[in-house]
Amino acid sequence: MKAKTTVIAAALFTSSAALFASGAYAQSTASETQRDVNQQQRIEQGLKNGSLTTREGAQLERGESRIDRMQSKSLKDGDLSASEKARIQSAQNREGRQIYQQSHDNQTGNPDSRSSERMQKDVARDIRQEKRVGNGVRSGELTNRETAQLERGQARTDRTEARAGADGRVGFHEQAGIQHRENGQNGRIYNQKHDDQTRR
């Protein structure tokens, strides 16, 4: 009887540890995704108030793309180690400093220009999509690997935005290409959140 009780207790402990680890993963990944949202909001605000030019916004989107790629690579195996998390946070800290420096230099943008308005719209959509990914992580609708795939998609979108605004101007056709990519990402987020896979 004592042996049976010990086996049951061990099984309960293992199950509890797995649930705790899963919860800790979700909290950690959700916090990284929330930081992506915060930084994209700062870029959007800078474009809207003219403290960022379109070219500066594009440079910052390139940095966001690098961070999303790091997150994707780190989560691809279904786990986020302490060292991987530290590297991502270090990259996010660098990006945060870049946003601050670009927003407080002598360059100013015209928030009412068509290029800035197009970039503002694209960055606002990045924010909504990152929020949806973060919500999916917190709710358990997204597995670790699904989150990795979606962050890779976010990286591609950010990179497309960076290329479009690198010359300081986002044209109509360039934005159409960005929107096409964003529409695809939007569908992937929906499909991944509503499939049969859930985080255990």
Image: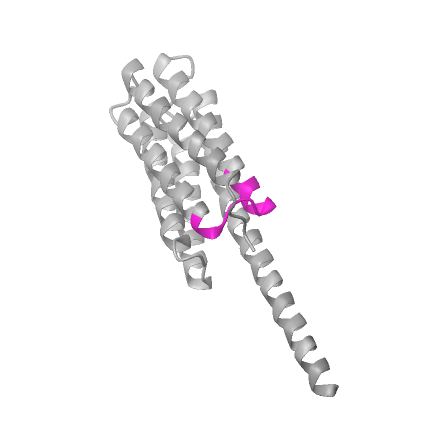
- Asked if the stretch drawn in magenta spans residue 63, the answer is no
Identify which residue, 113 or 155, lies in the foreground.
155
Instruction: Answer whether residue 17 is visible to the viewer in this image.
Output: yes
Residue at x 52% of width, y 44% of height:
196
Q: Which image quadrant for residue 25?
A: bottom right
In this view, 196 is above or below 161: below
Residue at x 61% of width, y 71% of height:
14
Q: Position of residue 18 (x, y in %)?
A: 58, 64
Identify which residue, 178 or 98, lies in the foreground.
178
Q: Which image quadrant for residue 67?
A: top left
Q: Is residue 172 left or right of residue 128?
A: left
Q: Position of residue 81 (x, y in %)?
A: 45, 62
Q: Is residue 35 left or right of residue 157?
A: right
In this view, 107 is above or below 142: above
Q: Is residue 2 left or right of residue 105?
A: right
Q: Which image quadrant: the N terminus?
A: bottom right
Identify which residue, 73 or 141, lies in the foreground.
141
Q: What's drawn in magenta, residue-wise? A: 133-145
- Asked if the stretch drawn in magenta spans residue 144, the answer is yes
Q: Position of residue 113 (x, y in %)?
A: 37, 13
Residue at x 45% of width, y 58% of height:
80
